[in-house]
Image (cartoon, rainbow, N blue to C red):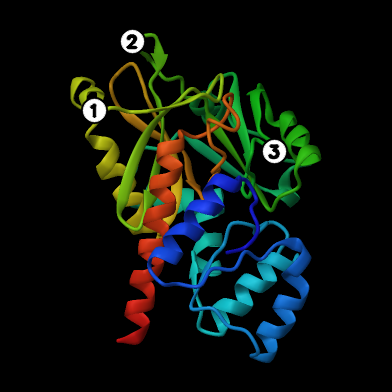
Amino acid sequence: MTHKLDSDDFFIQRVQQHCAERGMNFFLIEPLWIEPFRIYYRLGEVWARVLLNMHSEHHQPDEIYPRLGRLAHERGTRVIDPPDVALEAFDKARLHRRLVEAGFNVPPTVIVAREEVPTFQLNDGQREMLGTPFVIKPSLGYGRKGVILDATSEKDLTRSLAAFGNPHYLLQRKITPHQLNGEPAYFRVYYVFGSIWYCWWNCFTDQYRMVSQQELENYQLGPLREIVGRIAAVSGMKFFSTELAQTATGEFVAIDYVNDQCHMVTKSSNPKIGVPDELVAAIARRLVEGAHELIVEMKR
C-alpha cells in the first residue's frame, strides 16, 4: 500500500489488521522507503501481488508514486486501480464523454482545451445552456483545486487555469440540490469491489453522515445503487466514490463522477470533514477482501 494521500492511521491500521487476519503480508510504502522500494522492485528483489494505490498525482505522471504504480502494473502486480483505468476514469473530460454516450444524467457541459483558453468564447446557445453563475472544473482536479463556483463568463477560465493548470476544463451548469428534511439532497457514494455505501454529504459544510436503511426507503434513494453500479461498469474502477445530487424534480444528477484514492480521514480524527469511522472500517475490510480475490484469480 502506498503512503496515505488523504488517509489517517485508523484506515492504515485496519487494512494491516485485515491483511494479518488473512495471512497476507502488508507493507506501507512511505516517502522514506519509496525510492529504494522502487529500485528493488525494478531489479526483481521485492515484489507484491497487490498494490493499493493511495498516493498518485495523476496530473504529475513523472512523480515517483505514479511511476511505481506503472512499474508494478507492468510487472504483473494487480494495482487497485490499474494506472490506465484510473487515469481514464479520473479525467473528468474523458469520462464525461463516455457517461454522456452511456445515457447518464450529467450537468450540461462545455469542454475547453487548455490551449483554447486565451481565445475561447461561448456562443449564445452555450451561454443559455450553462446559465449564470456556472461551474468551472479542471479535468484532472481534486480537492476543489481550480474549481470556480461563481463563473459568469468564459473569462473566468483564466482563474481556473491560474489556480490549477490542466489539459482541459469543464464548464458546467450549476446543479442545486433540493432539501430533504433540512439537509441538501447531496450524496457521496462509495464503491469497493461491488459493495456500495451511501453518505449524506453536505456540499456546503463538507459534513458526512451515513444514509440509514430507513432513509433509503423513505426518500426513495434506490436509484443511487443503480447509478453507481453503472459508473463502475463504464469506468472499470474497483474502488472510488462519486457525488450525486437530487434536484427539486426528483432526478439524480452525477456531479463529480469518479474520485479515486478516496478521502479516508475518519470523523473521530477530524469531525469537520471526516468520513464516519464505521464506513472507513468497512471499506478497509472490503479492500483487503478484494485484494484477496485478486490473488485467488492470479493463481487460477
| Residue positioned 30% across, 43% down in the render | 227
Asked if the residue under mark 1 is in contact with the one under mark 2, i.e. CB atoms within 8 Å, the reply is: no
Q: CA distance from mark 2 to mark 1?
A: 13 Å
Q: Earlier in the sequence, mark 2 or mark 3?
A: 3
Residue type at numbered disc 2:
Asn
Seen in the image, is 174 located left or right of residue 118? left
Give the x, y percent position of residue 167: 69, 53
Which numbered tag is attached to residue 111? Answer: none
Quadrant for the N terminus in the image: bottom right
Instruction: Identify residue type, mark 3.
Output: Lys
State the image coordinates of residue 93 (x, y, percent, origin top left): 55, 50
Residue 293 position by quadrant: bottom left
Foreground residue among 102 and 201: 201
Nearest-to-viewer mark from 3 and 1 = 1
Residue 111 at x, y percent in the picture: 58, 44
Specify the farthest residue to the left: 217
Secondary structure at numbered mark 3: loop
Q: Which residue is mark 3?
A: 145
**Residue that appears at 70% across and 62% down:** 30
Tag 1 or tag 3, which sits nearer the N-term?
3
**Residue visible at 57% across and 29% down in the picture:** 273
Location of mark 2 (residue): 181
Nearer to me, 42 or 121: 42
Q: Disc 3 and disc 1: Cα gap in Å?
A: 32 Å
Residue 87 screen position, x and y as percent: 56, 61
Residue pointed to by mark 1: 216
**Mark 3–mark 1 contact, CB under 8 Å?**
no
The C terminus appears in which quarter of the rendering?
bottom left
